[in-house]
Every structure is written in C-alpha cells, then in structure tokens.
Amino acid sequence: SYVLTQPPAVSVAPGQPARITCGGKNIASKSVYWYQQKPGQAPILVIHYDVNRPSGIPERFSGSNSGTTATLTISRVEAGDEADYYCQVWDTDSEQVVFGGGTKLTVL
Amino acid sequence: QITLKESGPTLVKPTQTLTLTCAFSGFSLSTREEGVGWIRQPPGKALEWLAVIYWDDDKRYRPSLESRLTVTKDTSKHQVILTITDMDPVDTATYYCAHAQTTFNFDRWGQGTLVTVSS
C-alpha cells in the first residue's frame, strides 16, 4: 500500500522558516493535505489541495508538491506553531486515506 | 458553523464490539458532497484512518480492518455510527470523527474520545 514518509522531528528558532517534508511515490499526482495537532487537541486542517490555506489559517503557512515530495513551509515560526504535523493523501490504487507518520515541530 | 462530537464507552473488554456515535451540526448528510470520516490515534502514535461515509451512502473502509468495521448514518438524527467488532488492546486509541470533503480530506474534527480496551 501507499506510504508517506515524514521526518520524525524538525527544530527551528523563532522567526526562522520551518520546512516539513512528506515523501511518497509520485506524490505530485495526488492532492496533499496537512494537519496541525497540538498536544491534547484534535487536528486542524492547515493546507488543502497541496497549496491552499483554509480560512483562518495564517499566511505564514504554505504548501508545495512536486515529484516525490510535498512540503509544508511555515515562513516565520512562532512559539504557538509548536505541534505535530501530518500529511495525508487519498490513494486511488488501494482506495484508502493515508496519513504520514507525523513530524514534531519544536520551536527552540 | 460545523461541529462534531464523539460519544461512546471509554472502556471495552477484549472481543467485545465497540459502538461510537458522531453527532454533528452545521451540515446535513442528505446534502450532496457531504461526508463524515472516522480516524483514530493510539496514545503517542500517528493518525490512522478507519472509514468514511458520504451523503449518497458511499462507504470506504481501511482495507486492513474492513472485516471489523461498519459505518452507518442516521440523516434525520444528524448522526454517524461506527462499529468495530472483536476489539483488542491494540485498538486502544482516541477516536475522532470529522467532516469529510469529497476529496477524502477532513476540514473539521470532533474533540475525540479515548477508548481503552482492557479486561
């Protein structure tokens, strides 16, 4: 079945950009979704259809998808961005929703 | 404003059947392109998709668990029900329901409910 690979952890200083990757075979042919999950809370959709921000999501959040890697970028990281981030796709071959393993973003 | 809330037992014994209810508001499952999904998260682990049901009664299940899962909707009550048979301690997790878009992504989530499987 389809596998999405994320780095377990990313650390960044406040005000610096953070980039979280999501690798998958020919992922560029799929729509990628990104969720933010803070401790003890439900996930929140922060990017849909690869690059679009739902209403209420700060402009600091952006997405890209090319080749075998999708990327979530937070342009100027704030302490409040510290969370787990998950990528997700729909795999048409196995007809299932697939989540990545999650990346813990730490703000130094 | 879309809201969802999960309810059900917090503790089940191994081999029992788990029944979870998702009560939602702000949309109707009789409206085209609306759906509700179920996702779970074992303690300290990643999200795991289980099932989704759409307005036209289209249902999709996680292939590895399909034999144990059933999802149904009660449109008049604004509820979706998930049943999981033959529960095992590895099924211990927080179970979320979420509003699903037709492209199989989830734009609003419930708060989740922790279910522990133990004798």
Image (cartoon, rainbow, N blue to C red):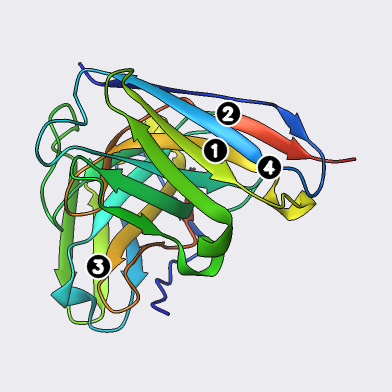
Q: CA distance from mark 3 to mark 2?
A: 31 Å
Q: Is A74 on the left-hand or right-hand side of A36?
A: left
**Circle 4 sits in a helix, a strand or a loop, which is it?**
loop
Q: CA distance from mark 1 to mark 4?
A: 15 Å
Q: Give the vertical position of A34 relative to A89 (above or below).
A: above
Of label 2 and label 4, which has the lower sequence position?
Answer: 4
Disc 4: which residue:
B17
Disc 3: which residue:
A70
The image position of residue A85, as x and y in percent, is 40, 49
**Which mark is in front, 3 or 1?**
1
Disc 2: which residue:
B113
What chain does mark 2 sit on? Answer: B
Mark 1 crowdedness (10 Å alpha carbons): few <14, some 14-19, many ≥20: many
Mark 3 crowdedness (10 Å alpha carbons): few <14, some 14-19, many ≥20: many
Determine the image quadrant of residue A56.
top left
Give the residue type that dot 2 points to. Answer: Thr
